[in-house]
Amino acid sequence: MADKAREHLLQQVKEQGDLVRKLKAAKLNKTQIADEVSKLLDLKAQLGEENAVQHKLILKTPKGTRDYNPEHMSLRLGVLEKIIAVFKRHGAETIDTPVFELKDVLTGKYGEDSKLIYDLKDQGGEILALRYDLTVPFARYLAMGKISSIKRYHIAKVYRRDNPATTKGRYREFYQCDFDIAGQYDPMLPDAECIRVVSEALESLDLGKFIIKLNHRSLLDAVFATCGVPQDKFRTICSSVDKLDKTPWEEVKKEMVEEKGLNEETADKIWNYVSKSGGVDLIADLRQDENLMKQKSAVFGLDSMELLLKYCTIYKVINKIVFDLSLARGLDYYTGVIYEAILIGDDVGVGSVAGGGRYDNLVGMFDSKKKTVPCVGVSLGVERIFSVLEAKMANDGVKIRTTEIQVFVASAQKNLHEERMRLLSDLWDAGIKAEQAYKKNAKLLAQLQHCEEYGIPLAIILGEGELARGEVTLREVTTRKEFPIPRDQLIDEIRKRLQN
């Protein structure tokens, strides 16, 4: 690197570092600070090649990511199996899309959250970005394939340049678990089923008590119009309201007034509405509000909510539902019903574990003829669910099995490893999950301890005397009881015991 260029770069690093320190001292918006820190790191990286030899390699995962050990993966796969079983019970089929998209596909779809999209460098003339969620790629998939109806689930990693809080299941790289119904159907029938899917999934995971908050974007727009919010500020004010689940009203109001230019009186009027929650009773109360009912979108929103609550009663999930006017969901693409599932009284404090809603116009944004495909869906926050379950198991002292081995083949004397191998081959042919020690003459005690440590239910012990009689010893690992079994009856006996 030429001296002048290097001096210029060093000066840029210094100035950017000063800016970051000022922003941190002023305690400004965390996302803005993160953006400036990212720029500082990029500048430092440009100095990295020359200084690479001087730096000691630090072994760590990038911020907002983590490794998953066998215990974690066993838990994760178990969770995903239960969720997929629910999706399949409702007739969903699965798809997959690329982990990165053309940047133009992603931009302009997420409102204020667009700044969290991970940009990639120019790749052969294509400007790309890592996918932010699975919904926008799904809409692109529908538009590209001219698909007008599908019920699909998709489980894959997404990426957000967010401020991570890993203890609460908030990462920069994480799995999303989506279920969506696309197609032109009668009002609220698919929407109610999505809510039932959320309820079934959370029930199957045994996470404890939860509620599902419901609202309607048309109703929110009517509230904003009634309170005097200019129409061009609806979406940005919606993003502010969306923070009420984790931020006090006074801070949200300050953001509306000082950062977004709303007058204080209008903000206070908004609070009078968004502080309300209930059920069918709230619909009746809002219909008494003459100013609100002047808005056509309020009439439509309340009629829709009434029908949805009726269907939720039929689907037996009404006792888990709260109609909450503070629920906003900040993403721009929602057009109708929105919902969010929240754990009640969880010790981890992860809050929302699922969310979704109706997005009827998203597919049309990708279609040259603006042909729309109405869609409604839900996304389960599996990382947050994993955090809850990991903490729960740690508190209960539960040990997670990391393998599915059913039978361990052991030997009591030396030079029987080939007999073990012959038996293993028969067990594998019969579809039984089995393994042995990789030492010719492993000590019997060590082999049995391995079974107890890894929760293997059965052990077969080979000895010269048993082999001469055409028998093996079958041991129940938990009870330590042993039974002589004829070799030709072994497979049937193992299957019977595993079934019991």
Image (tube, rainbow, N blue to C red):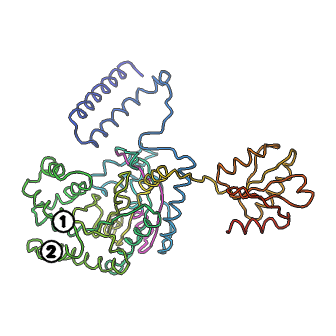
Can you name the residue that lies furthest to the left here? 265
Residue 421: percent from the left, percent from the top? 82, 53
Q: Which residues are magenta?
A: 138-162
> Which picture quadrant has residue 283?
bottom left
- Find disc 1 in the rendering and name its residue: 276
Residue 305: percent from the left, percent from the top? 25, 75
- Find disc 2 in the rendering and name its residue: 285
Label 1 and label 2: CA atoms lie apart by 10 Å
Seen in the image, is 285 located left or right of residue 307? left
Classify the position of the C terminus by image quarter.
bottom right
Q: Which mark identifies residue 267? A: none
Tell me which amino acid carries mark 1. Answer: Lys
Q: Secondary structure at mark 1?
A: loop
Q: Secondary structure at mark 2?
A: helix
Number of other residues with Cα within 10 Å of mark 2, as a class: few under 14, some 14 to 19, many 20 or more: few
Asked if disc 1 and disc 2 are in contact, CB closer than 8 Å, the reply is: yes
Seen in the image, is 26 located left or right of residue 133? left
Residue 196: percent from the left, percent from the top? 39, 72
What residue is at 25 percent from the left and 62 percent from the top? 327
In this orientation, which residue lies closer to the viewer: 198 or 226?
Answer: 198
Residue 319: percent from the left, percent from the top? 33, 73
**Does residue 156 belong to the magenta stretch?**
yes
Tell me which amino acid carries mark 2. Answer: Asp
